[in-house]
Amino acid sequence: MSGLSLNDITKEFGDFKAVDNVALNVPHGTFVCLLGPSGCGKTTLLRMIAGLEEPTSGRIVIDDEDITAVPTHKRNLGMVFQSLALFPHLSVGDNIAYSLRIRGASKQDQQKRVDELLKLIHLPGFADRPVAKLSGGQRQRVAIARALALSPRLFLLDEPMSALDAKLRESMQVELRQLQQKLGITTIVVTHDQREAMTMADLVVVMGEGRIRQAAAPVEIYRKPADAFVADFIGSTNLLPVSADSAGRATVLGSAISGLTLPSGGSKASISVRPEDVHLTAPGNGAIDGTVTFVRDLGGTIETFVEAGGKTIIAVATPRERPEVKVGQSVGIVLPPESCVVLKS
Amino acid sequence: MRREAPRSIGDYTPLFFPALMLIVFFVVPFSTMIAVSFFKRDPAGFYKTDFVFDNYARFLSTFFGSVLGFSLMLAVLVAICCIAIAFPFTYLLTKQSRKVQTVWLVCLLSVLSLSEVIIGFAWSTLFSRTAGITNLLVAVGLMSQPQALLPGFGAVLTGMVYQALPYTILVLYPALVRLDPTLLEAARTLGASPVRAFFNVVTPALRNTLVATLIMVFVFALGCYLLPQILGRPSQWTLSVLITDQAIYQSNMPFAAAMAVFLVLMSLALVGLTLLVGRRENAG
């Protein structure tokens, strides 16, 4: 298979399993985001793909070639580090040309490729500048250009945007995604920022405690989270217990929701409902009874916190959709069955 | 944080004490020495106040010139050997676990507690024919009979490198600990083998530290006068040995002072040259 394939990768540090039996297939040209909280093993996994760590067991295969035992400098990959790791003693051009120099490319070829890459990252004419004189965003781009100089078969980025301010980060995300699509290069980005993952990725891999919790397209991850961990990590969500009543209907906080089916065999589970899917109506009529405890008007959206049966449910709507509600008001909560995702326990 | 530049005399008060110490223990003795170097020797007593260039003239003979050359060469060689051994060693040390690092550093510090005399005699025993390390080589079968490795140039060099090495490592250690390990990893992902990455990335990133360390060990080795006497032949005696000899045994203070002044000037010139070369390479 063309692309990257991770076969049952495990990495142990002493007794601690940083990465636990990870298996993943990444088709050629895919943009993958490894997403998870800190300490979930995503960076360790990326470093193993780069060859900077050795897996305890498992195999890493690129384009049908087993590279598990191949040292980093022979893997032909480009990597952008969290610290960017630009060489402080070299100019922008020499930084970008470093890998070409190692391969013994001629001066003219180096020059040509550097100019090409500088144009690609929108910094033409920067070749002779010292790295120390660049702004954060420019350093970021230079690090990307340096990693791409040899047209690697795999492009790895370890939390590349973490040093940038919020606005610059958003534009760099879009830029990186466009660059990746233009080059059609298989790319793996480690991030803990779910917005970043949603912006860029074809395939989001949510990791927790060293395991892959879910690997799917961004929208699917958001709409159909596999378990409570994923639902909670991606965006905000309402996690509510659901049980079957005597008639076998699925019941949430005392109200039956028709059209929602529990997994066969179980009488208890939990569901995830996104705040924007929660509707508020007048009490009664089969809706869940609740009391408004807090209203947050953010201008673009209004978040309403409703307490029902000891749980706080958050509902988000635009000011146009949301009827005026006040703290202390009784409301009815309607959960549309098609928006309720029953989670694996 | 930027601080205001001192404006009144009062703002300089913290500098008074170090300045005083520097004047009392460096400027005054050094000026005295320069003055003495122009005095005339009095064979009956100590020296007579005068202003002659005889002492410097005598120094410009081939004998003392070659001793000066040898001293500078030895100090440079010691500095280069120390860097060549200490730099890779310290680099690898910083890659070890905290515990291993501590043990090594404590051992190195304990070497510092040895005096030059003890180091000299320890090495003279190790290099001797009767009890030296060649006996071990004979026992292993690598040599047919034990051999004396001293007096000789190799013995002097070994002793001085041994003495200066802990200082070199302790000066390099903080800089190498602070070095961003991802620089090396980045070089490896760009296709450089670990050894190549070390020379391409770590060495240039630490060039200023390396130049500073080189100068420190050079100055340190230049002042060494016991080890050449214990481990070397008279032809391997450094200028420091001759200065001691002239000042203490020949009672020729003016000549000893002239040699000392010359040594200081030469080493200052060499240090200046090193800095100049370092700066030019940095700019280029």
Image: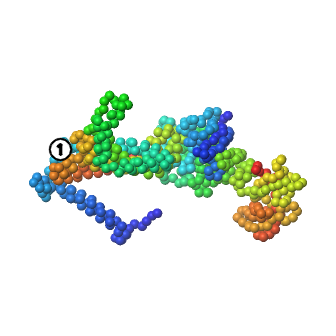
What kind of element bears circle 1?
loop
Which three-letter amino acid code belongs to the residue tagged 1?
Answer: Ser
Residue A151 appears in view? no
Residue plotted at (36% across, 29% down): B141
Return the residue at label 1: B61
Depth order, front residue of B62/A31: B62
Judged from this view, the residue extending furthest toward the left is B44
Residue at x 31%, y 50% (from the top left corner):
B115
Q: How crowded is the residue under tag 1: few (<14 C-alpha within 10 Å), some, or many (20+)?
A: few
Residue A318 occupies quadrant: bottom right
Quarter of the image holding residue A166? Answer: bottom right
Q: Nearer the viewer, residue A16 or B265?
A: A16
Chain assignment, label 1:
B
Q: What residue sits 34% from the left and 29% below the top? A: B143
Whether residue A160 is visible here, answered yes or no, is: yes
| Residue A147 image position (x, y, % from top left) | 56, 43
| Relative image position of residue A167 (x, y in whole percent) | 61, 57
